[in-house]
Image (spheres, rainbow, N blue to C red):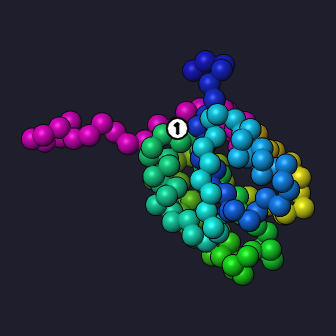
Amino acid sequence: MTSTWKPRIVLFQCQWCLFSEADQKWVDTQRPRNVRLVKVPCTGRISPLYILNALQGGADGVLVSGCKPEMCHFKEGNLGARRQLDEFANFLEYAGLEEGRVHFAWLDVQERGRIQQELADMEARLVEMGPSERMKTRAPLKEGGLA
């Protein structure tokens, strides 16, 4: 692994959690190239299968950013998402994925620059862990049997 390796991160972002126009502009146009953005109407709409798909598709980590519990536009969607993703994280750990590759961040609409810090912290954790190979999809099966 070279010192220039950048982990691939998928950011699932609630469309309501970044109130600051500057923060949203940074996410939309200036975020690092190794971060892929998936906007959702609410974190409560994220199926754990989307996260599994991101990890199998080559992501080294997944960050889910949602509104603070009392600030959810859909009342309790983010609380349901947090419970579901906590249980899913237990499954991923059981499957052999290191803890810390999937992270949920509550973002207060008044916190400026927090999304940048969350992504920087996640990237630092992932660099320390190294590339993820555990969940990535293997080569397709060959006709007539196992590869």
Indicate the quadrant where residue 45 lies: bottom right
**The magenta stretch spans residue 81:** no
Residue at the image point whose x is 67% and y is 57% from the top: 13
Tally the marks.
1
**The magenta stretch spans residue 131:** yes
Residue where numbered disc 1 is placed: 132
Rendered-image quadrant of the C terminus: top left
Residue at the image point whose x is 64% and y is 34% from the top: 33
Indicate the quadrant where residue 129 lies: top right
Q: Main secondary structure of the magenta part?
A: loop
Q: Which residue type carries mark 1? A: Ser
Kind of element beneath mark 1: loop
9 vs 108: above or below: above
Q: Is residue 32 visible?
A: yes
Left or right: 37 as drawn, with respect to 137: right
Rendered-image quadrant of the N terminus: top right
Q: Position of residue 90 (x, y in %)?
A: 55, 61
Left or right: 58 as drawn, with respect to 4: left
Residue at the image point whose x is 85% and y is 49% from the top: 22
20 vs 138: above or below: below
